Image (cartoon, rainbow, N blue to C red):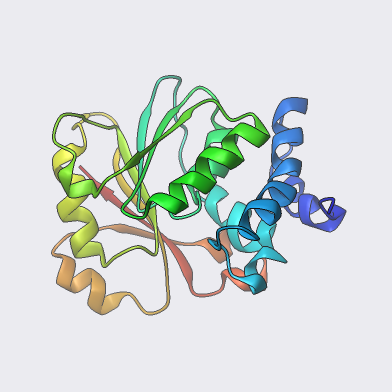
Amino acid sequence: MESSPQNMELITKYFDDFTPTQLAQFTALEPAYREWNSQINVVSRKDIDHIYLHHVLHSLSIAAVVEWEKGTQVIDIGCGGGFPCVPLAIFFPEVQFLAVDSIAKKLKVVDAVCEMVGIKNIKTQHTRVEDIKNRKFDYAVSRAVAPLKDLWKWAGPIITKKPNQPNGLICLKGGDLHQEIFESGVRPKMMSIHDIFQEEYFMEKFIIQVKK
């Protein structure tokens, strides 16, 4: 099934400086995920019909608030089927991503989609993030995986402190987060995604940034 135009128009509505390669890769995501999702279910049926809104554009909200330089090292904690790392890897082709998840079959989908779409800058690792001891990253990203308290407990030790950069943890979350933020013990920067993308879907969805 080909990608429907209004879906890709959602992406190009907000981002207009893609190379032909990037446009082709974004366009190829829907058929790639449809093919693999029929074998290993990583995206709900409702979401697969709105993959550009619910997954791709949602992931790219991070790209709207950061500028990652060539060679930046990013870990996606609990990447699931590849969000936010797959859209971000297309957006930032010179940034290196490590996608980790404790469920191996989800990583199989990430690897397969990357191969089908031609993404070269994601490596996957079947592990729990708390078991990564020998590597450091500039940023950690995550989407609705765990409470902020846990995410920071896992991410903090593996993020390199950069004095003049706002690097650290960036996670995508929704709903009323006051209690979760209070319990985390950190003071994050919180941005409404609806302020970036005016789609109704992003009401009550937020980018949470914790500086190292």
Image coords of residue 39 (percent x, y) = 61, 58
Query: Which residue is at 21% across, 30% downward?
Result: 136
Query: Which residue is at 44% across, 55% downward?
Result: 80
- Do we see residue 19 in this rendering? no
Quadrant hosting residue 43: bottom right
Figure check: 161 above or below 70: below
Image coords of residue 21 (percent x, y) = 73, 26
The front one of 113 and 25 is 113
Figure check: 36 above or below 21: below
Image coords of residue 12 (percent x, y) = 76, 45
The C terminus - image quarter: top left
Drawn side of residue 114 relative to residue 154, left or right: right
Quadrant hosting residue 178: bottom left
Image coords of residue 188 (percent x, y) = 27, 58
Quadrant hosting residue 164: top left
- Do we see residue 12 in this rendering? yes
Figure check: 164 above or below 50: above
Count of numbered marks: 0
The front one of 153 and 49 is 49
The front one of 5 and 103 is 103
Figure check: 85 above or below 175: above
The N terminus - image quarter: bottom right
Query: Which residue is at 57% across, 40% downward?
Result: 112
